[in-house]
Image: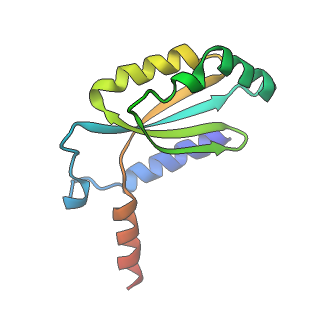
């Protein structure tokens, strides 16, 4: 049910997103990208067991790789963790490999290209209230 709700929200948000870039949505000049990673907990196993596996696999030592910016890192209760990273596009494979080597087994992962829409969304909200 949570997955269906999340999918519906993503589709709805995508439908409402801007179709043409504006001055607020200019691409980064330094080839920086953002990616949101959904670490879904394996709910068939107790948390202590999952944490022990992450420790054995060196997850927190390896993730995030040095020099990769953590934009946000939230726990979604009952589902897992949601992490948004900002990084040079050339380091995407490195981030993926770190996750494959240190998170798999304790988490199932999903990846979403991401961009910062907050200023645009808040601006539209403020304008609509006038």
Looking at the image, residue 125 sits to the left or right of residue 99; the answer is left
Looking at the image, residue 44 sits to the left or right of residue 30; the answer is right
Q: Is residue 45 visible?
A: no
Q: Position of residue 93 (x, y in %)?
A: 36, 20
Q: Position of residue 107 (x, y in %)?
A: 63, 24
Q: Position of residue 88 (x, y in %)?
A: 29, 32
How many discs appear?
0
Q: Which image quadrant for residue 130?
A: bottom left
Residue at 41 percent across and 72 percent down: it is: 125
Residue that extends furthest to the bottom in the rendered view of this protein: 130
Residue at 36 percent across and 63 percent down: it is: 119
Q: Is residue 87 above or below residue 120?
A: above
Residue at 46 percent across and 46 percent down: it is: 11
Q: Is residue 111 above or below residue 120?
A: above
Residue at 66 percent across and 42 percent down: it is: 2
| Residue situated in front as seen by the camera: 130 or 102 | 102
Q: Which image quadrant for residue 117?
A: bottom left
């Amino acid at each position: 049910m949570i997955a269906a709700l999340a999918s519906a929200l993503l589709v709805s948000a995508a439908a409402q997103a801007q179709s043409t870039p504006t001055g607020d949505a200019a691409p980064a000049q330094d080839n920086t990208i953002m990616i949101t990673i959904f670490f879904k907990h394996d709910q068939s196993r107790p948390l202590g067991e999952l944490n022990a596996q992450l420790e054995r696999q060196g997850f927190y030592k390896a993730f995030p790789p040095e020099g990769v910016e953590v934009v946000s890192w939230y726990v979604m209760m009952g589902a897992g963790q949601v992490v948004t990273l900002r990084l040079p596009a050339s380091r995407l494979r490195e981030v993926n490999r770190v996750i494959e080597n240190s998170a798999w087994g304790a988490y199932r992962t999903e990846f979403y290209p991401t961009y910062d829409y907050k200023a645009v969304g808040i601006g539209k909200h403020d304008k609509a209230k006038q």
